[in-house]
Image (cartoon, rainbow, N blue to C red):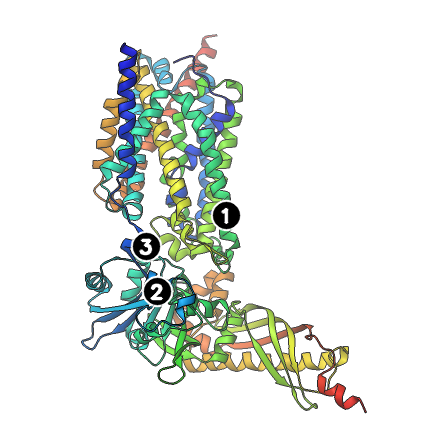
Amino acid sequence: MNMVKISNYQLFSLIVLFQVGTTIIFGFASSAGRDAWIAVLVSMIIGMAEIILFLWLMRQHPGLTLVDWFIVRFGKWIGTPIAWLFPVLFLYSTGRTLRDLGEVMEPILLPNTPPLVTLGVMLAVICYVTYHGIETLARVSETLLIIVLGAFCIEVVLLLSSPNLVSFRYLQPILSEGWGRIWKTVWPTGITQSYAQTIEFAMIWSLVNHPEKVPKTTIYATLIATAVILIADILAISVFSEYLFTRSTFPLYSVLGEVKVGDFLENLNPLGVIYLSTMTFFKTSLHFWVSIRAIGQLTKMKNEHKLIFPLAFLVLLLSLTMASSLTEHVHIGSKVLTIYFWAPIYLGLPCLLLFVIWIQKLRKRESM
Amino acid sequence: MLKLRRARWISMLALCLPLLLAGCWDRMEINDIAFVMASSNDIAENGELLSATKIAVPSGLGSGRNMGQTSGVNQSFIIESASGRDINDLIQKLQGKLPRRLNISHRRVLYIGEKLAKRGIAPILDHYSRNPTSRHIEYILVTKGRESIHFLKSNNPLERIPGEEVRELERLNTGAVYSLRDYLIEDNSAGRTPVMGVVEMSGSKGREEIMLGGSAMFKKDKLIGYLSHDETKVMLLLTNRIKYFRINSNVPKERGNVAMQLIKGKCKIKPIVKRDDVKFLVEVQIIGEVLENNTKLDLSEPPDLEKVQEALRNEIQKKVQKAVANIQKKYRADVFGFGESIFYKEPKVWKRLEPRWEGIFARAEVTVKTQLTIRNAGMNGKPFHLKEKGGK
């Protein structure tokens, strides 16, 4: 598997798709009301700092992956259990993203089809791409990025050209409710959702053709992903006003139903289905591949393919049973998972690593 | 040999794949669906909700030629009604009468009966905004004077597709037509009284037609009153929604009158707040074209055009002032979003004023400034009758 190489453009498209993810359906920071776009910017600034931290850690361990970092720094006995936390969480994320698909599919698209079937069929495709490995997934992402960004451009143009639809005055008054509700969405959801999850790329960075270009590519990709989320949020607020925006379960999906250009272009919901299926397919595959690779590395397994089927079964079970309703699913996502799992593991552990590296460097200098 | 067997297995598996593609639990063929074009909501005699839906009959929508001779047999729509405690109850009863599944995602119009509107529309609005297949862009209208179910029955001979007439009327922009989304947003924005379009029946029995008539104001989900045609026009002008506006005026010191049509209308509301003393400066900008000129003025002469412009400007100014004053005093309903303009500019001041807004709005001093430009004067310079008389 070490022969695998992906190009920088492929890395770029992987990161953009990963960070935009299902946000393009679920919306970002909608509880911040009309100031949600400020929350996006604030999250990006903090998220960028996180990503720079991950990149710095990568520079400190050239050629190594996320799970190796901990083993190298903490030793085999302490490092291995810590490193195991990541694949477990990634695997949970796989199930969660798959569940996201089910949560939109069931009420809106295919109400009578059992989730086992929709999710199972999707998972079969995901297993197939995972079987072929990251190179294939990266090539797929090149194409998907063009499709998704193209669809998004069409959406923006059509929304803006619908008469009496978008009115930017709904963004006013800016910050009238103060920073309180912005911080509530930035911490912990905003900065963990898209940005801290980027730590999964620490499993991929070592595979890139030109490692010296990785930081630049990652940062550009983050900026593009944020721009997409920002534009989508601003449009949704300007279409729905604060009231409907905060109330809507899938604001960025519903916004597509509002388009009305001329007398014939209405109901753009198929675009939403394109986003949904490409994004969940892609994100789930990436989560899945990353967790399999991490487990493979930790167990020093020679043929990681053996892991695909048992783990896929586990993921399917997880996604079907992790929550009993959308309300519960969202609650876990925003109240439990982000604070108690993502923040300490995705942010806390890398910070700890940073701290340890500093101390080790200081000691080296002293001993010299 | 082994390879061959493997290839056979794979091709067998591949043959099974189409089974996955064809089977679908949510398959919905177009001939299993009844498309709802419009719905009405009223109060039944026992106090329950009474709702009716107008459903398109596809065979009746066929080619245009045989439409003229249809008489009931080949109708393009049917109406089904039911009563129930809430909308879901209703839909269940309606569905029981129909051989096809109701599909509301193409509904254009939602009528609300006057009586129901007075009782309160919050219970029915929740269903319409929650149901994922119902769309926010359908028009929502109050039926003035009669139960809304009568409006479903009307079928304008000009329009072949049922329910289409209201949509077409809206496209001509002759009156106020608001979508469900507009209403929900206005109802929940600070400092604004939500309004809805109104339809009336005109004409005599047997030959009745739907007519857009003014607009309806709501407070706390209850209908509190109607705005007249003129007031509605002013409301649309002040909320930047105006599309179609014709105005005529006498020209002072001249006999006869002139009439213009609006090309573009814009309005800015500027709040001036000093403690509890609230003033508004309303700046109206209109570009129009003259359509009728019965005076002796020659509109190709700038001084004459000036006079006409002045007369029309004063007329609009008067209309706006009158309508605003009337709405302030009579209904205390801020349909123009005056409060909203304070909220946008000074949210903190708005927080202080909000609880007493109705009273403050009613007393607020409103200054109207109108600017009118006549861009063109139709196809003639001088009026026709001038030419005849000037011929000597």
Residue at the spot 55% in from the left edge and 75% down from the top edge: B245
Quarter where residue A140 is shown? top left
* Label drawn at residue B60: 2
Secondary structure state at the residue bearing disc 1: helix
Q: Position of residue A109 (x, y in %)?
A: 31, 46
Q: Secondary structure at mark 2?
A: helix
Q: Chain of mark 1?
A: A
**Position of residue A172 measured from the top left corner of the image (x, y, whole percent):** 49, 57
In this rendering, position of residue A215 left or right of residue A286:
right
Q: Amino acid at mark 1?
A: Val
Q: Chain of mark 2?
A: B
* Above or below, A47 relative to A108: above
Q: Which one is nearer the viewer's eye here, A196 or A364?
A: A196
Tell me the chain of label 3. Answer: B
Alpha carbon distance from label 3 to label 2: 25 Å
Relative to A175, is A360 above or below?
A: above
**Front one among B115 and B4:** B4
Q: Which residue is mark 1?
A: A156
Tag 2: amino acid: Gly
**Badge number at residue B133:** 3
Q: Residues within 10 Å of mark 3 (few under 14, many from 20)?
A: some
Amino acid bearing label 3: Thr
